[in-house]
Image (cartoon, rainbow, N blue to C red):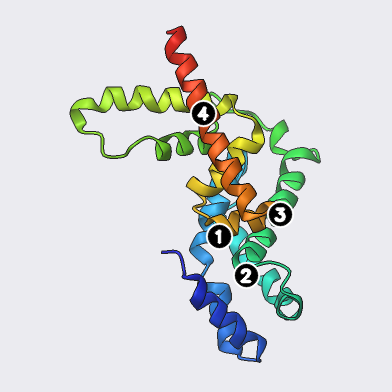
Amino acid sequence: MTPSSNTTEELVARAGAGDGEACQLLLTRHRERLRHMVAVRLDRRLLPRLDPSDVVQDALAEACAQLPDYLLERPLPFYPWLRQIAFDRLIALHRRHVRAGKRSVLREEVRGPARPDESVLQLAQRLVASNTSPSNRVLHDELVGRVQRALQQLAESDREVLVLRYLERLSVAETAAVLGISEGAIKVRHFRALQRLRGLLGAGEGSA
């Protein structure tokens, strides 16, 4: 369950006043949200080497060390700040394991076909209504496939705002903090991304 912003703000205020218990609660109450983010973002080639829970644990340890500075400056709302630490950790792990060195996973033997972009598949499944009856399952799966193909044609900026809103389930305010733009701009970008997605789906129907 997503912690309420009010409760988080209360904990931030208590932590800023020197409450050690509040500091620990701030870091641990968002553990599952971070784990979900890491699971969505983690390169699937790294799964044999990395567990999302371990990535989150390392990120929380780093956040604990940085928390005093955060409480003084508060450059972002708490969860976007915490998420950024975990996201930066993911980038560093990707560079270490995928892009560099003789033991890179790129140099390892690939067993079986490459996996599809699972985050796009998950996003397509989220965007398609989940209450399809079993008798319409084939139609449901076909629609998921169409949405997935349309998502892959979207610009990365459009797809990213949809991932943040629908897969990571960030609020408008959190999404704005993550992307460094205003809440109004997020609403516009979100709306336009959905419009473009609908346009691609309509074009697909016309060419069928």
* Residue on which the image places disc 3: 180
Name the residue rendered at 59%, 36% in the picture.
159
Circle 2 — which element?
helix
User: 146 or 203, which is in the foreground?
Assistant: 203
Name the amino acid type tagged 4: Leu
Earlier residue among tags 2 and 3: 2
Instruction: List the residue tagged with mark 1.
Output: 34
Disc on the earlier residue, 3 or 4 = 3
Judge depth for marks 4 and 2 and give the one in front: 4
Residue 75, above or below 72: above
Residue furthest left as drawn: 135
Cβ atoms under marks 3 and 1 closer than 8 Å: no
- Quarter of the image for residue 143 reads top left
Q: Residues within 10 Å of mark 4 (few under 14, many from 20)?
A: many
Specify the amino acid type for callout 2: Phe
Q: Which residue is mark 2?
A: 78
Classed neighbour count for the residue bearing mark 2: other residues with Cα under 10 Å, few (<14), some (14–19), many (≥20): many
Closer-to-camera residue (105/77): 77
Tell me the distance, in whole angstroms, between the alpha carbons under discs 4 and 1: 27 Å
Q: Earlier in the sequence, mark 4 or mark 2?
A: 2
Quote the CA–CA distance across marks 4 and 2: 31 Å
